[in-house]
Image (spheres, helix red, strand yellow):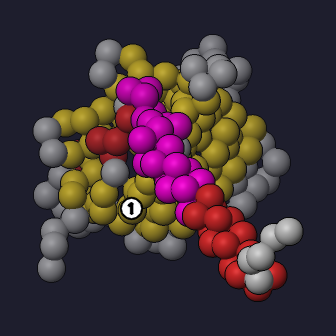
Amino acid sequence: MDSMHPFRRMRYALAGIALLAGMFAVASAEAQTSAPARCSTVEYRQFDFWIGEWDTFEADDLNGPSIARASITPIVDGCALHERYEQADGLVGDSILSFDPVRRRWQQTWITNRGSNMVLWGELRDGALVLEGEVHLHDGATVLQRITWRREGDAVRETAVLSGDGGARWEPAFDVLFRKRDAR
């Protein structure tokens, strides 16, 4: 016959359960901290040069006034970048840039406060990120756009060309330089 009081048995059982739960919690925490981040491969870091707070200048007037401010931040544990772009003339754009591990390509989805959106795909070419795709304008028109981002010293140069004829001819759209915003 068991001479242990029922409450004592209950305390020992609860203490054992608490000990096991603590061991599982420690093991789970160790697994989470020792496991590599899901988006830590080199492909996910190809666009990190653009992370930061930027003032934007026309390439043909680098000493002129800033035409826009941009903030590029990593999101979702470094698996994507968020761009917030605010131009001096009131244009505001937001985009998400991410590396697609199945297609092995970058994707950008861009939306503006003027009703335009675009989805671009591309990859790193000769040290520059080159993305291309359709831009759907607020008036219903669709054009092709190719955008290239390239590091230039401490700055980032972004150039774009447009095609309204399915890619037969390309014309310059813009050429800007992002400079790190002064800490004031």
Asked which quadrant contains residue 149, the reply is top left
Q: Position of residue 118 (x, y in %)?
A: 67, 43
Q: Quadrant of the C terminus?
A: bottom left
Residue sitting at x 62%, y 58%: 20
Q: Does the magenta stretch mainly form a helix, a strand or a loop?
A: helix
Residue 25, horizontal then vertical, whole percent: 56, 58
In the drawing, does residue 174 fall left or right of residue 117? left
Q: Position of 113 compared to 140: left or right?
A: left
Q: Quadrant of the N terminus?
A: bottom right
In x, y percent, where is residue 102? 66, 21
Q: Which one is in front, 172 or 122? A: 122
Looking at the image, the residue that sits furthest to the right is: 1
**Residue 168 shows in the view:** yes
Relative depth, front residue between 172 and 95 = 95
Say which of 79 and 154 sits in front. 79
In the rendered image, the vertical position of residue 139 relative to residue 184, given as above or below:
above
Q: Residue at x 21, y 58 (%)?
A: 180
Dot 1: within a 10 Å radius of its alpha carbon, few (fewer than 14), some, or many (20 or more) residues?
many
| Secondary element at image label 1 | strand
Residue 29 position (above or below residue 173): below
What stretch of residues is rendered in magenta? Answer: 22-44
- Say if residue 113 shows up in the picture: no
Residue reaching furthest to the front: 1
| Residue at screen point 36% across, 65% down | 69
Q: Give the residue number, with chain letter if any, for mark 1.
A: 70
Q: Is residue 38 part of the magenta span, yes or no?
A: yes
Q: Per the image, is 72 magenta?
A: no
The x and y percentages for residue 60 are: 23, 45
- Hey, which quadrant is residue 55 in on the image? bottom left
Does residue 43 appear left or right of residue 111 in this picture?
left
Which residue type carries mark 1? Ala
